Image: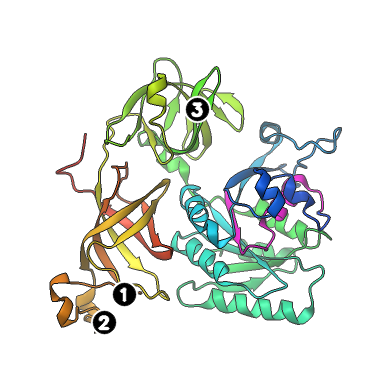
Amino acid sequence: RIAVVGNVDAGKSTLIGTLTTSLLDDGRGKSRTSIMKHRHEIESGRTSTASTHLMGFRSTGEPIAGRDPIRANKRKTDDEIAREAHRIITLMDLAGHEKYLKTTIHGVSSGMADYGLILVNSRQPPTHMTQHHLNLCCSFGIPVIVVFTKVDGCPEHAFKQCKEEVSKMLRAPDVGKTPFSIRNEQDIETCIDKLHTLAPMLETSCVTGEGMEFLQKILFALPKRRRHEKKLNRSFEFLVEDIFNVPGVGSVVSGFVNAGELTVGSSVNVYVGPTDDGTFLRTVAKSAHIARINTSHVTAGQSACLAFSLPKEVRKKLRRGMVVLKEFPTSTREFDAEICVLKGEGTTIRRSYQAYVHILNVRQSAFARNIEIVNHNAIGLPPSHAATPDEEEDGIVLRPGSRAKVRFEFAKRPEYIRPGMRMLFRDGRVRGVGIITSIPKAQSVA
């Protein structure tokens, strides 16, 4: 699973369209329109939603063309690709525009990406959005691959300056990757197993097709990073990403199996929730689909759809960010997290600071209940952290670069979370990352 991010006009959707259909672009948005979802996206040429696309490889490493041999204009459906592919890569097309940053953050945090493809338009230096996306991938610990797009008509000096800027961004201390240009096949082999320190850089063009086979080779050679097989023995957990009402079937949720396994059938009870008051709905999982193929068994690491039998009035309670569990669900309004505020933003965080929290597929605004700075005795408090005399009663203030333990409380409704989940919080722009350490037991709503 690969997340594709980058600046507004970097050509993310075009790259995905060219990779999945293996047709070259015409420079006028031809391969982009083949994968876009909404009408306004095709008209303005900007992706606004996160969508996923499959790309299959045969065992030899040659990509499966995404178009039918007979009817050239029809794209193969997901299940046709999934049936004949030896190894499948899911490309997540994310929005690049600053207005849609929230959608992009949610896509990266809930999409469980193994790698990030950061696209940079080589005709202009990278913008602050590229920096944001880079920080985003690093704060989730996702290895990045930098792809320079549109090199076919690019003046030398612009490209040179662009490369220097990107290398500077990658070498910055909070990212700490070494840029590594890829010019032949040996380069691919050298960097493939050192991705946590190296950031490979490729030059591609979707119009002339230059550099495309390198990109395909890299994508084929990438090792799987998340070990979902390890989570098989935990109890079943399914993250809801989208909800549909299918006529004749009832309510269908799509999402990602995060842990465990489930065999669907009329006798299987699952819990969906939490609803707004923190309770869970008990229901029956009737059927499941993976890549539009009907299956009876879903396991960890798969993206799937589940159909539930729910009465009509309960259906309205379904929303995104829920989970589907097999046994004893709990939901909580409060949680403790150990956070680190990102550098470079002028934020001060004190008690009752409100931010928008992304935890996997849960997103909601939360308050900071109380704050303790973690390792201040080691270095001693920097002078900026000690509260100035006029805000004595307020206690601790967090500034960029500091780490702290914070008790958060959700503003609207309880959610299902468990310790060890990664979180990211922001108000406007990305502010900080953290890991949930514990959930207070006393007042958890059963």
Q: Can residue 196 be seen in this view?
A: no
Q: Please, is residue 160 above or below residue 393 in the view?
A: below
Outermost residue on the top side: it is 266
Pointer 1 residue: 399
Label 2–label 1 contact, CB within 8 A: yes
**Secondary structure of residue under mark 2:** loop
Residue 384 numbered tag: 2
- N-terminal of the pair, mark 3 or mark 1, is 3
Q: Which of 308 and 411 is in front in this view?
A: 411
Amino acid found under the numbered disc labelled 1: Arg
Give the distance between the C-alpha atoms of the residues marked 3 and 2, in whole angstroms: 51 Å
Instruction: Judge the density around disc 3: few (<14), some (14-19), many (≥20) Cα neighbours within 10 Å.
Output: many
Q: Is residue 438 magenta?
A: no
Q: Which of 43 and 424 is in front in this view?
A: 43
- N-terminal of the pair, mark 3 or mark 2, is 3
Give the distance between the C-alpha atoms of the residues marked 3 and 1, in whole angstroms: 44 Å
Give the distance between the C-alpha atoms of the residues marked 2 and 1, in whole angstroms: 8 Å
Q: Which of 370 and 86 is in front in this view?
A: 370
Residue 252 numbered tag: 3
Start-end of magenta stretch: 1-24
Residue 400 position in % (x across, y down):
35, 74
